[in-house]
Image (cartoon, rainbow, N blue to C red):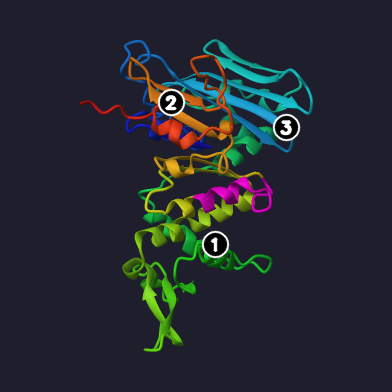
Amino acid sequence: AVIYGANSSGKSNLLKAIGRFKKIINSSSKLNSTDKLKISPFLLNQETAKEPSFFEIELLLDNVAYRYGFTANNQKVYEEWLYTKEGKAKKEKCLFVRTEEGIGIADDYNEGKGLEEKVRDNGLFLSTIDSFNGEIAKKIIYKIDNFWIISGINHESWSGFTNDMCNIENPDLSFQQEIQDFLKSMNVGFNRFELPEDEKLAKEIKAYTIHNLYNEQEEVIGETRFSMKEHESSGTNKLFDLAALVISQLMLGDLLVVDELDSKLHPLLTQHIIKLFNNPKTNPKGAQLIFATHDTNLLNVKTFRRDQIWFTEKDHSEATDLYSLAEFREPEGNKIRKDRSFEKDYINGRYGAIPYIKD
Protein backbone atom coordinates (compact mmCIF):
# COMPACT_ATOMS: atom_id res chain seq x y z
CA ALA A 1 0.00 0.00 0.00
CA VAL A 2 1.27 3.48 -0.90
CA ILE A 3 0.18 6.62 0.96
CA TYR A 4 0.16 10.07 -0.66
CA GLY A 5 -0.66 13.39 0.92
CA ALA A 6 0.55 16.93 1.44
CA ASN A 7 3.21 17.70 4.04
CA SER A 8 1.68 17.71 7.53
CA SER A 9 -1.35 15.76 6.31
CA GLY A 10 -0.76 12.88 8.75
CA LYS A 11 1.15 10.24 6.72
CA SER A 12 4.00 9.93 9.23
CA ASN A 13 1.63 9.89 12.21
CA LEU A 14 -0.29 7.01 10.65
CA LEU A 15 2.91 4.98 10.29
CA LYS A 16 4.09 5.99 13.77
CA ALA A 17 0.78 4.73 15.14
CA ILE A 18 1.56 1.27 13.72
CA GLY A 19 4.94 1.47 15.46
CA ARG A 20 3.34 2.57 18.75
CA PHE A 21 0.83 -0.32 18.49
CA LYS A 22 3.74 -2.78 18.14
CA LYS A 23 5.69 -1.13 20.97
CA ILE A 24 2.77 -1.28 23.41
CA ILE A 25 2.27 -5.00 22.68
CA ASN A 26 6.01 -5.74 22.94
CA SER A 27 6.52 -3.88 26.21
CA SER A 28 3.24 -4.68 27.96
CA SER A 29 4.51 -7.67 29.97
CA LYS A 30 7.65 -5.78 31.00
CA LEU A 31 5.98 -2.61 32.34
CA ASN A 32 5.65 -1.70 35.99
CA SER A 33 2.20 -0.63 37.21
CA THR A 34 3.24 3.06 37.13
CA ASP A 35 4.88 3.05 33.67
CA LYS A 36 3.30 5.15 30.92
CA LEU A 37 2.14 3.78 27.55
CA LYS A 38 3.41 6.86 25.66
CA ILE A 39 0.19 7.34 23.69
CA SER A 40 -0.44 10.79 22.22
CA PRO A 41 -4.13 11.54 21.52
CA PHE A 42 -5.36 14.03 18.93
CA LEU A 43 -4.81 17.31 20.79
CA LEU A 44 -6.59 19.78 18.51
CA ASN A 45 -10.01 18.75 19.76
CA GLN A 46 -11.06 19.25 23.38
CA GLU A 47 -12.98 15.97 23.47
CA THR A 48 -10.47 13.64 21.78
CA ALA A 49 -7.65 15.08 23.90
CA LYS A 50 -9.37 13.46 26.89
CA GLU A 51 -10.44 10.21 25.21
CA PRO A 52 -8.43 6.96 24.92
CA SER A 53 -6.92 6.15 21.54
CA PHE A 54 -8.20 3.24 19.43
CA PHE A 55 -5.86 0.61 17.92
CA GLU A 56 -6.98 -2.41 15.90
CA ILE A 57 -5.41 -4.83 13.45
CA GLU A 58 -6.59 -7.75 11.34
CA LEU A 59 -4.23 -10.67 10.84
CA LEU A 60 -4.42 -13.81 8.72
CA LEU A 61 -2.43 -16.59 10.41
CA ASP A 62 -2.49 -20.17 9.13
CA ASN A 63 -5.67 -19.38 7.16
CA VAL A 64 -7.44 -18.15 10.29
CA ALA A 65 -8.42 -14.46 10.53
CA TYR A 66 -7.93 -12.62 13.82
CA ARG A 67 -9.10 -9.14 14.76
CA TYR A 68 -7.36 -7.74 17.80
CA GLY A 69 -7.48 -4.28 19.32
CA PHE A 70 -7.62 -2.10 22.40
CA THR A 71 -8.35 1.44 23.54
CA ALA A 72 -5.93 3.12 25.92
CA ASN A 73 -4.52 6.42 27.08
CA ASN A 74 -1.12 7.10 28.58
CA GLN A 75 -1.99 5.48 31.91
CA LYS A 76 -4.59 2.78 31.31
CA VAL A 77 -6.08 0.19 28.94
CA TYR A 78 -9.86 0.75 28.86
CA GLU A 79 -11.01 -1.91 26.42
CA GLU A 80 -9.48 -4.90 24.68
CA TRP A 81 -10.88 -7.55 22.34
CA LEU A 82 -9.95 -10.57 20.24
CA TYR A 83 -12.19 -12.05 17.54
CA THR A 84 -11.56 -14.86 15.08
CA LYS A 85 -13.09 -16.20 11.87
CA GLU A 86 -12.18 -19.50 10.25
CA GLY A 87 -12.60 -20.66 6.69
CA LYS A 88 -15.82 -19.56 5.02
CA ALA A 89 -17.60 -18.61 8.23
CA LYS A 90 -19.64 -15.43 7.80
CA LYS A 91 -19.64 -14.38 11.44
CA GLU A 92 -16.74 -13.68 13.73
CA LYS A 93 -16.36 -15.56 16.99
CA CYS A 94 -15.43 -13.63 20.13
CA LEU A 95 -12.53 -15.11 22.14
CA PHE A 96 -12.42 -12.41 24.80
CA VAL A 97 -13.66 -8.89 25.50
CA ARG A 98 -12.31 -6.59 28.19
CA THR A 99 -14.10 -3.53 29.53
CA GLU A 100 -13.64 -1.40 32.65
CA GLU A 101 -16.09 -3.76 34.42
CA GLY A 102 -14.01 -6.88 33.73
CA ILE A 103 -13.00 -9.51 31.19
CA GLY A 104 -15.37 -11.93 29.47
CA ILE A 105 -13.88 -15.08 27.92
CA ALA A 106 -15.50 -17.52 25.50
CA ASP A 107 -16.34 -20.89 27.05
CA ASP A 108 -14.07 -22.77 24.67
CA TYR A 109 -11.15 -20.30 24.84
CA ASN A 110 -9.19 -21.96 27.62
CA GLU A 111 -6.00 -19.92 27.21
CA GLY A 112 -7.35 -16.94 29.16
CA LYS A 113 -9.22 -18.78 31.90
CA GLY A 114 -8.08 -17.89 35.43
CA LEU A 115 -5.83 -15.04 34.27
CA GLU A 116 -8.39 -12.23 34.45
CA GLU A 117 -7.08 -10.89 37.78
CA LYS A 118 -3.43 -11.04 36.72
CA VAL A 119 -3.57 -8.19 34.19
CA ARG A 120 -2.59 -4.67 35.29
CA ASP A 121 -4.52 -1.51 34.38
CA ASN A 122 -1.71 -0.47 31.99
CA GLY A 123 -1.10 -4.01 30.70
CA LEU A 124 -2.70 -6.01 27.89
CA PHE A 125 -4.64 -9.19 28.55
CA LEU A 126 -3.22 -10.66 25.33
CA SER A 127 0.32 -10.22 26.72
CA THR A 128 -0.74 -11.80 30.02
CA ILE A 129 -2.07 -14.84 28.15
CA ASP A 130 1.16 -15.00 26.15
CA SER A 131 3.29 -14.95 29.32
CA PHE A 132 1.38 -18.08 30.41
CA ASN A 133 2.12 -19.76 27.04
CA GLY A 134 -1.26 -19.24 25.39
CA GLU A 135 -0.85 -20.60 21.87
CA ILE A 136 -3.06 -18.14 19.96
CA ALA A 137 -1.78 -15.12 21.91
CA LYS A 138 1.81 -16.20 21.31
CA LYS A 139 1.16 -16.58 17.58
CA ILE A 140 -0.40 -13.10 17.31
CA ILE A 141 2.32 -11.37 19.34
CA TYR A 142 5.07 -13.17 17.41
CA LYS A 143 3.59 -11.93 14.12
CA ILE A 144 3.29 -8.33 15.34
CA ASP A 145 6.81 -8.52 16.79
CA ASN A 146 8.08 -9.18 13.25
CA PHE A 147 6.68 -5.92 11.91
CA TRP A 148 9.41 -3.41 11.02
CA ILE A 149 8.51 0.29 11.03
CA ILE A 150 11.39 2.46 9.84
CA SER A 151 12.30 5.86 8.44
CA GLY A 152 13.42 6.04 4.83
CA ILE A 153 15.45 9.15 5.68
CA ASN A 154 17.21 8.10 8.90
CA HIS A 155 18.21 4.62 7.78
CA GLU A 156 21.92 4.51 8.68
CA SER A 157 21.41 2.48 11.85
CA TRP A 158 20.03 -0.43 9.81
CA SER A 159 23.39 -1.10 8.12
CA GLY A 160 24.36 -3.07 11.25
CA PHE A 161 21.37 -5.36 10.68
CA THR A 162 22.49 -5.96 7.09
CA ASN A 163 26.02 -6.76 8.32
CA ASP A 164 24.68 -9.10 11.01
CA MET A 165 22.49 -10.98 8.54
CA CYS A 166 25.42 -11.34 6.14
CA ASN A 167 27.44 -13.02 8.90
CA ILE A 168 24.81 -15.67 9.68
CA GLU A 169 26.20 -19.10 8.86
CA ASN A 170 23.40 -21.17 7.40
CA PRO A 171 24.24 -24.10 5.09
CA ASP A 172 20.79 -23.87 3.46
CA LEU A 173 20.86 -20.15 2.80
CA SER A 174 23.54 -17.60 1.93
CA PHE A 175 21.95 -14.39 3.13
CA GLN A 176 24.98 -12.42 1.98
CA GLN A 177 24.52 -13.77 -1.54
CA GLU A 178 20.84 -12.76 -1.44
CA ILE A 179 21.91 -9.21 -0.57
CA GLN A 180 24.64 -9.26 -3.24
CA ASP A 181 22.02 -10.28 -5.81
CA PHE A 182 19.57 -7.62 -4.55
CA LEU A 183 22.14 -4.83 -4.98
CA LYS A 184 23.37 -6.24 -8.29
CA SER A 185 19.81 -6.18 -9.65
CA MET A 186 19.74 -2.44 -8.88
CA ASN A 187 22.86 -1.88 -11.05
CA VAL A 188 24.50 0.35 -8.44
CA GLY A 189 27.89 0.41 -10.16
CA PHE A 190 30.09 -2.05 -8.27
CA ASN A 191 30.73 -5.77 -8.74
CA ARG A 192 30.08 -6.85 -5.15
CA PHE A 193 30.63 -5.77 -1.57
CA GLU A 194 32.88 -7.18 1.13
CA LEU A 195 32.58 -6.84 4.89
CA PRO A 196 35.62 -5.87 7.01
CA GLU A 197 37.04 -8.90 8.80
CA ASP A 198 38.45 -6.93 11.73
CA GLU A 199 35.73 -6.37 14.37
CA LYS A 200 37.14 -2.98 15.44
CA LEU A 201 37.30 -1.83 11.84
CA ALA A 202 33.72 -2.99 11.29
CA LYS A 203 32.51 -0.19 13.59
CA GLU A 204 34.05 2.40 11.27
CA ILE A 205 33.68 0.72 7.86
CA LYS A 206 30.14 -0.28 6.86
CA ALA A 207 31.34 -2.34 3.89
CA TYR A 208 33.77 -2.21 1.00
CA THR A 209 32.58 -2.00 -2.59
CA ILE A 210 34.62 -3.75 -5.28
CA HIS A 211 34.89 -1.91 -8.61
CA ASN A 212 36.61 -2.72 -11.89
CA LEU A 213 39.94 -0.94 -12.50
CA TYR A 214 40.59 0.23 -16.09
CA ASN A 215 43.61 1.25 -18.15
CA GLU A 216 43.76 4.12 -20.66
CA GLN A 217 42.15 1.92 -23.32
CA GLU A 218 39.19 1.37 -20.94
CA GLU A 219 40.10 -2.30 -20.57
CA VAL A 220 39.56 -4.04 -17.23
CA ILE A 221 42.95 -4.72 -15.67
CA GLY A 222 41.86 -5.64 -12.15
CA GLU A 223 39.72 -4.51 -9.25
CA THR A 224 39.90 -1.79 -6.61
CA ARG A 225 38.20 -1.41 -3.25
CA PHE A 226 36.30 1.60 -1.89
CA SER A 227 34.67 2.41 1.41
CA MET A 228 30.89 2.30 0.83
CA LYS A 229 30.20 5.01 3.40
CA GLU A 230 32.81 7.45 2.02
CA HIS A 231 32.79 6.80 -1.72
CA GLU A 232 29.32 5.56 -2.70
CA SER A 233 26.21 7.68 -3.17
CA SER A 234 23.66 8.24 -0.41
CA GLY A 235 21.15 6.22 -2.47
CA THR A 236 23.52 3.24 -2.71
CA ASN A 237 24.16 3.44 1.03
CA LYS A 238 20.42 3.45 1.66
CA LEU A 239 19.90 0.36 -0.50
CA PHE A 240 22.61 -1.46 1.46
CA ASP A 241 21.12 -0.34 4.80
CA LEU A 242 17.62 -1.57 3.89
CA ALA A 243 18.63 -4.67 1.91
CA ALA A 244 18.44 -7.15 4.80
CA LEU A 245 15.09 -5.76 5.97
CA VAL A 246 13.53 -6.08 2.52
CA ILE A 247 14.89 -9.59 1.94
CA SER A 248 14.07 -10.93 5.42
CA GLN A 249 10.47 -9.67 5.27
CA LEU A 250 10.01 -11.26 1.85
CA MET A 251 11.44 -14.55 3.12
CA LEU A 252 9.29 -14.59 6.28
CA GLY A 253 6.11 -13.13 4.78
CA ASP A 254 6.05 -10.22 7.23
CA LEU A 255 5.25 -6.51 7.19
CA LEU A 256 7.66 -3.69 6.32
CA VAL A 257 6.51 -0.10 6.94
CA VAL A 258 8.70 2.71 5.54
CA ASP A 259 8.16 6.44 5.85
CA GLU A 260 9.49 8.10 2.66
CA LEU A 261 10.72 4.94 0.96
CA ASP A 262 11.62 6.97 -2.15
CA SER A 263 14.00 9.35 -0.35
CA LYS A 264 17.43 9.35 -2.12
CA LEU A 265 16.27 6.72 -4.64
CA HIS A 266 15.55 6.99 -8.35
CA PRO A 267 11.87 6.22 -9.10
CA LEU A 268 12.86 3.07 -11.03
CA LEU A 269 14.73 1.71 -8.00
CA THR A 270 11.77 2.41 -5.72
CA GLN A 271 9.54 0.72 -8.29
CA HIS A 272 11.84 -2.31 -8.34
CA ILE A 273 11.44 -2.77 -4.57
CA ILE A 274 7.65 -2.43 -4.89
CA LYS A 275 7.59 -5.08 -7.62
CA LEU A 276 9.41 -7.53 -5.34
CA PHE A 277 6.41 -7.34 -2.99
CA ASN A 278 3.78 -7.28 -5.75
CA ASN A 279 5.14 -10.34 -7.57
CA PRO A 280 4.08 -13.77 -6.18
CA LYS A 281 7.32 -15.29 -7.51
CA THR A 282 9.54 -13.02 -5.40
CA ASN A 283 6.97 -12.82 -2.58
CA PRO A 284 5.52 -16.34 -2.21
CA LYS A 285 4.67 -15.92 1.50
CA GLY A 286 2.63 -12.73 1.12
CA ALA A 287 4.93 -10.18 2.77
CA GLN A 288 3.48 -6.67 2.88
CA LEU A 289 4.97 -3.26 2.17
CA ILE A 290 3.27 -0.08 3.43
CA PHE A 291 5.02 3.19 2.68
CA ALA A 292 4.50 6.93 2.40
CA THR A 293 5.91 8.89 -0.52
CA HIS A 294 5.72 12.08 -2.56
CA ASP A 295 6.97 10.36 -5.73
CA THR A 296 4.04 10.65 -8.15
CA ASN A 297 5.95 8.70 -10.85
CA LEU A 298 4.79 5.57 -9.01
CA LEU A 299 1.14 6.57 -9.23
CA ASN A 300 -0.01 4.41 -12.13
CA VAL A 301 -2.08 1.31 -12.79
CA LYS A 302 0.99 -0.74 -13.81
CA THR A 303 2.45 -0.38 -10.32
CA PHE A 304 -0.62 -0.37 -8.07
CA ARG A 305 -4.23 -1.46 -8.00
CA ARG A 306 -6.68 1.24 -6.94
CA ASP A 307 -7.19 -0.37 -3.53
CA GLN A 308 -3.42 -0.15 -2.91
CA ILE A 309 -3.37 3.64 -3.34
CA TRP A 310 -4.23 5.70 -0.24
CA PHE A 311 -4.44 9.41 0.53
CA THR A 312 -4.27 11.50 3.69
CA GLU A 313 -5.91 14.90 3.91
CA LYS A 314 -6.67 17.23 6.80
CA ASP A 315 -10.34 18.03 7.38
CA HIS A 316 -11.68 21.41 8.52
CA SER A 317 -10.64 20.68 12.14
CA GLU A 318 -7.10 19.56 11.12
CA ALA A 319 -7.76 15.88 11.77
CA THR A 320 -6.41 13.40 9.21
CA ASP A 321 -8.82 11.69 6.84
CA LEU A 322 -7.47 8.47 5.27
CA TYR A 323 -9.14 7.09 2.13
CA SER A 324 -8.23 4.80 -0.76
CA LEU A 325 -8.61 5.42 -4.48
CA ALA A 326 -10.96 2.42 -4.62
CA GLU A 327 -13.32 4.23 -2.22
CA PHE A 328 -13.08 7.60 -3.95
CA ARG A 329 -16.15 8.91 -5.76
CA GLU A 330 -16.26 11.63 -8.40
CA PRO A 331 -18.84 14.45 -8.02
CA GLU A 332 -21.26 12.44 -10.19
CA GLY A 333 -20.92 9.48 -7.79
CA ASN A 334 -18.84 7.29 -10.11
CA LYS A 335 -15.79 5.26 -9.03
CA ILE A 336 -12.40 6.11 -10.56
CA ARG A 337 -11.83 3.96 -13.64
CA LYS A 338 -8.59 1.98 -13.77
CA ASP A 339 -7.70 3.45 -17.18
CA ARG A 340 -7.42 6.97 -15.70
CA SER A 341 -4.06 8.75 -15.46
CA PHE A 342 -3.76 8.57 -11.67
CA GLU A 343 -0.65 10.76 -11.50
CA LYS A 344 -2.07 13.55 -13.67
CA ASP A 345 -5.40 13.49 -11.83
CA TYR A 346 -3.69 13.61 -8.44
CA ILE A 347 -1.41 16.55 -9.33
CA ASN A 348 -4.45 18.40 -10.69
CA GLY A 349 -6.19 17.98 -7.33
CA ARG A 350 -8.83 15.52 -8.52
CA TYR A 351 -8.38 13.23 -5.49
CA GLY A 352 -7.50 15.91 -2.93
CA ALA A 353 -4.56 15.23 -0.58
CA ILE A 354 -2.28 17.85 -2.20
CA PRO A 355 -0.89 21.12 -0.78
CA TYR A 356 -2.84 24.24 -1.70
CA ILE A 357 -0.29 27.05 -2.00
CA LYS A 358 -1.60 30.53 -1.28
CA ASP A 359 -1.09 33.43 -3.72
- Name which residue type carries label 2: Arg
| Residue 83 lies in quadrant | top right
Q: Residue furthest right?
A: 88
Residue beneath disc 2: 350
The label nearer to you, 1 versus 2, is 2
Residue 163 in the image: above or below residue 199: above
| Neighbour tally class for label 2: few under 14, some 14-19, many 20 plus, Cα within 10 Å | few
Alpha carbon separation for disc pair 2 and 3? 39 Å
Q: Give the number of the disc on residue 64.
A: 3
Q: Which residues are magenta?
A: 271-285
Q: Is residue 148 or residue 312 the one in the foreground?
A: 312
Q: Residue at x 39, y 70 (%)?
A: 202
- Tell me whether the residue at label 2 lies in contact with that at label 3, contact meaning CB atoms closer than 8 angstroms: no
Residue 276: in magenta span: yes
Task: Say which quadrant the C terminus sits in.
Answer: top left
Residue 151 in the image: above or below residue 9: below
| Neighbour tally class for label 1: few under 14, some 14-19, many 20 plus, Cα within 10 Å | some
